[in-house]
């Protein structure tokens, strides 16, 4: 019971910080999500240190590289700068590859793979969030549209809540036993049902988007978010760890809180561009 209360309180604070930063102001969103990305990347590079051969200082610098990509995408999508803002990040990626040539590590290919994987699965989705929160299709300056990103996170949170509650009570059929033995099909459908139900309220806040399009976004987020969750479970199983860290009491590490985002954000962006903004 104590662990459940701790988990609930931590979850409430975490949700309040994320939702508040997105809804309050673009700069608040930039700062909060930049810090969260840095913490998630630090966790990732700490977990994979045995495969990347990175020291503590290098892990911090490589984490800052991912934060730069996020900030550059913010500047570009918000029309604060042009595409040249991405050039330093390209130099950073080239440095990652070239630097391994001069490090006498047993497996430089594995070093490359794990270092760049962190940029792809963490920095990449965070950067793509900016293409969701800024609508570049409107005339004039890009429009800051926090509701779309908030809706995505609400669907992720509802999916996690529904899957946990229904899976704990009714879960019998394993969803993907080889990777995540505790996940069940009953939990998956419970999370999907709750996300769809909550998405029916979104038209009250953005009525220009039809209700069925909101439900489509919820479904896409749940399906791909589940694959993202399973992908992180596979990573942790490969690295022989239970949680990515202990930063969030009752929830594990920062990486554990953004596992669904790895796949949900790219998929949601495709759906938003093709269906909602089309």
Image (cartoon, grey):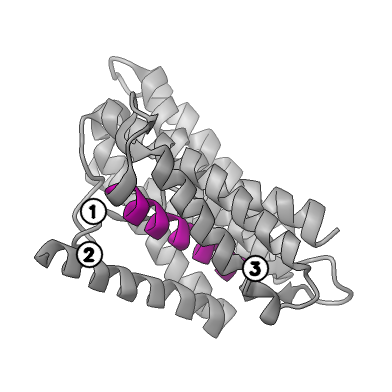
Which residue was labeled with disc 2?
Answer: 7
Q: Is residue 59 visible?
A: no
Residue 52 visible in the shown view: yes
- Disc on the earlier residue, 1 or 3: 3
Q: Percent position (x, y) of residue 148?
A: 65, 68
Residue contact between numbered discs 3 and 2, judged by CB atoms under 8 Å? no
Decide whether residue 152 is among the magenta residues.
yes
**Up/down of 237 relative to 214, above or below:** above
Q: Which residue occupies 33% across, 16% down?
A: 107
- SS for callout 2: helix
Q: Residues within 10 Å of mark 1 (few under 14, many from 20)?
A: some
Pointer 1: what residue? 252
What is the C-alpha distance between the residues marked 1 and 3?
Answer: 27 Å
Q: Which residues are magenta?
A: 148-168
Residue at 31%, 75% in the rendered image: 13
Residue of label 3: 148
Q: Residue most toward the top?
A: 106
């Amino acid at each position: 019971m104590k662990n459940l209360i701790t988990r609930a309180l931590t979850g409430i604070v975490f949700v309040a910080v994320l939702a508040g930063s997105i809804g309050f102001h673009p700069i608040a969103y930039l700062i909060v999500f930049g810090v969260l990305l840095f913490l998630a990347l630090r966790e990732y590079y700490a977990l994979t240190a045995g495969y990347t051969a990175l020291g503590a200082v290098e892990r911090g610098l490589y984490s800052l590289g991912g934060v730069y990509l996020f900030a550059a995408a913010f500047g570009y999508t918000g029309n604060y700068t042009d595409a040249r803002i991405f050039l330093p990040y390209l130099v950073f990626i080239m440095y990652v590859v070239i630097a391994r040539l001069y490090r006498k590590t047993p497996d430089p290919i594995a070093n490359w793979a794990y270092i760049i994987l962190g940029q792809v699965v963490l920095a990449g989705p965070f950067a793509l969030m900016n293409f969701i929160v800024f609508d570049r299709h409107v005339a004039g300056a890009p429009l800051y549209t926090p509701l779309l990103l908030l809706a995505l996170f609400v669907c992720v949170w509802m999916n996690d809540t529904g899957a946990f509650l229904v899976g704990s009570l009714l879960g019998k059929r394993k969803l993907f036993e080889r990777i995540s033995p505790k996940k069940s099909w009953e939990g998956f459908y419970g999370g999907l049902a709750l996300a769809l139900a909550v998405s029916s309220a979104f038209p009250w806040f953005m009525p220009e988007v039809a209700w069925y399009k909101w439900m489509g976004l919820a479904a896409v987020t749940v399906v791909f978010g589940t694959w993202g969750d399973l992908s992180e479970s596979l990573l942790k199983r490969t690295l022989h760890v239970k949680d990515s860290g202990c930063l969030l009491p009752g929830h594990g590490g920062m990486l554990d809180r953004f596992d669904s985002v790895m796949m949900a954000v790219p998929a949601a962006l495709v759906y938003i561009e093709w269906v909602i903004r089309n």
